[in-house]
Amino acid sequence: MRGFPDSPDYTGLNSPLREEYELQDLAIEGRVPGEVEGTFFRAVPDPAFPPFREDGGAVLSGDGMISALRIGGGKASFAIRYVQTERHVAEVAAGRALFGKYRNPFTDKPEARGLDRTVANTTPVWHAGRLLMAKEDGRPYRVDPLTLATIGRHDFGGKLKSETVTAHVRIDPQTGEMFLFGYEAAGLASTKVAYCVVDKHGHLIREQWFDAPYCSMMHDFAITEHYALFPVYPTTCDLARLQAGGDHWVHEMQLDSWLGVMPRYGDVGEMRWFRGPKGVSCYHMMNAFEDAHGRVQFDQCLSNVNAFPFIQRASGLNVAPGDLGGRLARWSIDLKTGADAVTETTIGPPGDLPVIPAASQGRPYTHGWMLTMNQGLQAPPVAGGPVGAMFNMLLRLDFTGKPPKGLALPPGQCFSEPVHVPSTAPGHEGWLLSIVDQQTGAEDFKHAVWIIDAGNLGAGPTARIAVPHRLRPQVHGWWVGAAELAAAQSARSRASFR
Ligand SMILES: [Fe+2]
């Protein structure tokens, strides 16, 4: 790509595409289940301009694009547009990059001073009829779910005080409330964490701040029916380092990890901190719940060190992918005792990008899915994504004692994070939708959306929808059913006629 470095962040599957487009009447192979009707939203980082300096976190700095795969009436279409963040608008106006290293404003061009740095590229969050594009370093941007046009930065009607909202929210399946948080809530390297509750109508009804044990990359969190859980892993930020032009994140193996637990409708003063192992790292939780004995169980895709190569380099670490010690780990805590540490058990293999049915959120659950590397594949994984290697196997994990089941791809193919579509049929586990990339040459790929029976992965895809255009790897996705979209649209139409 002209002007971009010849590095893994900008070549192969990671090649910048920088194109907004729409495709109608996609070719469908197989049968799309009738209940898979709605939109698969995806957040895709894609740098609009070549960087003006080296940046190890470049894949994470890509300008956010919102993509929509729409399925209904036996047809499918695809669209993708840039989120018009303040940063993107400023760079388009300048015709070049203005922002420097990943999450370090001290490396920016003077023209970028004071501008919102977020690229809104991590998760499309759907709640209360609104679509938000979120990234943990800023406030989310609201996007029109039909046109994908950017509406503007979303601060819950001026109520939000935190400077940040993470890309991982939790929505209670019974109350419809959205629980969210933001770290570095008071600015760069701040230990302040904002914890917020948004009611089912989208109103921010509570925001409280607390101090984390240290400033940490708190990418995700979890809720149970009665508690909110805040994990802290020792990937840390330091203001003096940023001011010296250094990296936002360094992983510190000697530091303890922590799990903060408080009643989810309580006061942050009630937070109890439980010590976890030193040096561990995790990006995503599968779920959390209270068991029959009242203990809190917290399930996460844990590893012994931060897996991102650019963070390892900044930390003086060099751990091979096979030595990360990845596992699906359950941390158990008993709030009735005076214990001040978590108890860990391994409940699954290495992997990431966990998915559960929305109805299982925060509740005891029997199964979930995640992506992993097929250890039996006699070929390297497809290079790409922020870590540099794409997952090539989809797993169904069973927590009732049954063994995991998987769907392995052939060499040269990879999965992106699936979304789950519930089924209305009794006993049916629903459907998983995932983009599958197939490498056909050094810079050549084919892409399709696979629709898979979530309870029968071994059967392979029920349907494949071809996307006849190069795609860049997504980060996270979100499924919104057709009825929900239609209800949101009619509510907006009514509001506009008032
Ligand atoms: Fe994430």
Image (spheres, helix red, strand yellow):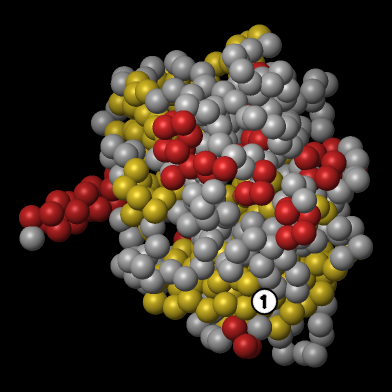
- According to the picture, the residue beneath numbered tag 1 turns out to be 211
**Viewer-closest of 230 and 342:** 230
**Hey, which quadrant is residue 281 in on the image?**
bottom right
Q: Is residue 367 above or below residue 408?
A: below
**Viewer-closest of 468 and 83:** 83
Q: Position of residue 192 (x, y in %)?
A: 63, 72
Q: Secondary structure at mark 1?
A: strand
Mark 1 neighbour density, 10 Å: few (under 14) some (14–19) many (20 or more): some
Residue, x 80% and y 67% (percent of image)?
Answer: 257
Looking at this view, name the residue that lies furthest to the top.
441
Q: Is residue 416 above or below residue 314?
A: above
Q: Is mark 1 within 8 Å of ligand 1?
A: no
Q: Position of residue 30 (x, y in %)?
A: 43, 22
Q: Position of residue 370 (x, y in %)?
A: 65, 45
Residue 7 visible in the displayed image:
yes
Instruction: Report the side of 450 relative to 89 (left or right).
Output: right
Residue, x 77% and y 51% (percent of image)?
Answer: 244
Residue 395 visible in the displayed image:
no
Q: How many marks?
A: 1
**Hey, which quadrant is residue 415 in on the image?**
top right
**Hey, which quadrant is residue 193 in on the image?**
bottom right
Residue, x 44% and y 78% (percent of image)?
Answer: 206
Instruction: Report the side of 395 relative to 141 (left or right).
Output: right
Q: Position of residue 454 (x, y in %)?
A: 54, 42
Residue type, mark 1 in image: Asp
**Viewer-closest of 267 and 251:** 251
**Viewer-closest of 76 and 101:** 101
Instruction: Report the side of 335 relative to 304 (left or right).
Output: left
Q: Which quarter of the rendering shows the N terminus?
A: top right
Residue, x 81% and y 82% (percent of image)?
Answer: 340
Q: Which quarter of the rendering shows the C terminus?
A: bottom left
